[in-house]
Image (cartoon, helix red, strand yellow):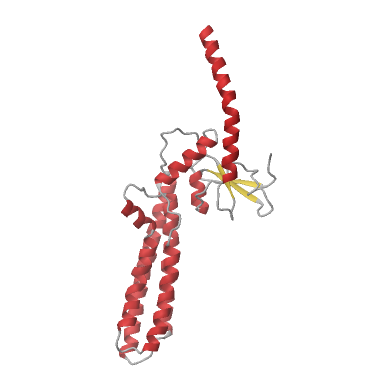
């Protein structure tokens, strides 16, 4: 079987290769460099979000002390700016973890690194919310409105920072070994822009359909990096297992014949 779809090979130095059972995933130097850049930008954006929060608190207190309404364009605008900075920073941080994933050996650090975006969402909004809700000079209606705005911003930032598929060195290693075992020792898979699984065969019915015109090919790690795909297609897995079961007796016979010939020599 074959596919008539456009197949795009993913670039980069992390090329498909044959490995062995002792293989442990190690990010390429290129990916490490990219991850470091993304993390630096993320930290700068988060620092900018904290600064925006400080100014929002100052504008809020200034309005309250001047006996003006704290619900003004400055306070709301700074809350929105705070949200944008936190959200974009979290996206960059999650991208960096897919390029250079942490290890699960230290579970605390593993969860902190993967969910740092959620932590920063609380850091960037919780103090502001506390200032709004605990200020005795603000009436209940203003507290409810402004507190709700900041609370919704915190919720959006938290959702943006949450990592549902936490990447790890161990996960990349295990999934790469699984693909190699099924794929003749090759770390080589296919996926699409809208797909949630990577595949061993480009003609798999799940990706060789009318829903897409382009199929990407690369390593397991590259599937993680581009689409955060962590699941192997069940259909491809079963097909590969059946193919290996058929091939196993043939290989065994060939090995036996080779051994007998070597013995006769």
Q: Quadrant of residue 161?
A: bottom left
Residue 113 lies left or right of residue 251; in this view the side is left
- Picture layout, residue 61 above or below residue 108: below
Q: Position of residue 73 (x, y in %)?
A: 43, 84
Asked whether residue 9 is in view, the answer is no
Report the front residue among 110 and 36: 110
Q: Position of residue 96 (x, y in %)?
A: 42, 54
- Picture layout, residue 263 above or below residue 99: above
Asked whether residue 76 is in view, the answer is yes
Q: Quadrant of residue 174?
A: top left
Report the front residue among 213 and 52: 213
- Picture layout, residue 87 above or below residue 236: below
Residue 69 lies left or right of residue 209; in this view the side is left
Q: Residue at x 33, y 79 (%)?
A: 57
Q: Residue at x 31, y 84 (%)?
A: 61
Residue 22 lies left or right of residue 184; in this view the side is left
Q: Residue at x 63, y 43 (%)?
A: 202
Residue 185 lies left or right of residue 58; in this view the side is right
Q: Position of residue 19 (x, y in %)?
A: 47, 34
Q: Residue at x 52, y 53 (%)?
A: 227
Q: Quadrant of the N terminus?
A: top right
Residue at the limit of the structure toward the bottom, as seen here: 67
Residue at the limit of the structure toward the top, as seen here: 265
């Amino acid at each position: 079987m074959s596919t008539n779809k456009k197949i795009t090979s993913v670039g980069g130095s992390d090329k498909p290769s044959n490995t062995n059972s002792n293989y442990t995933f190690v990010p390429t130097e290129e990916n490490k460099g990219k991850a470091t850049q993304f993390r630096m930008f993320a930290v700068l954006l988060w620092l900018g979000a904290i600064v925006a929060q400080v100014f929002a608190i100052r504008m809020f207190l200034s309005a309250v002390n001047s006996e003006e309404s704290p619900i003004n364009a400055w306070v709301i605008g700074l809350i929105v700016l705070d949200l944008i900075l936190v959200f974009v920073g979290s996206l960059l941080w999650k991208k960096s973890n897919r390029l250079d994933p942490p290890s699960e050996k230290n579970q605390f650090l593993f969860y902190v690194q993967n969910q740092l975006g959620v932590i920063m969402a609380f850091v960037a909004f919780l103090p502001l919310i506390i200032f709004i809700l605990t200020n005795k000079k603000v009436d209940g209606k203003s507290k409810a409105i402004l507190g709700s705005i900041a609370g919704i911003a915190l919720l959006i930032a938290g959702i943006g920072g949450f990592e549902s598929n936490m990447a790890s060195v161990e996960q990349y290693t295990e999934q790469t070994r699984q693909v190699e075992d099924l794929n003749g020792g090759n770390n080589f898979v296919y996926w699409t822009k809208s797909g949630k699984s990577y595949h061993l065969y480009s003609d798999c019915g799940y990706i060789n359909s009318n829903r897409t015109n382009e199929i990407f090919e690369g390593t397991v790690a590259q599937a993680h990096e581009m689409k955060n795909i962590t699941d192997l297609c069940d259909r491809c897995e079963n097909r590969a297992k059946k193919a290996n079961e058929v091939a196993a007796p043939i290989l065994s016979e060939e090995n036996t014949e080779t051994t007998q010939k070597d013995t006769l020599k």
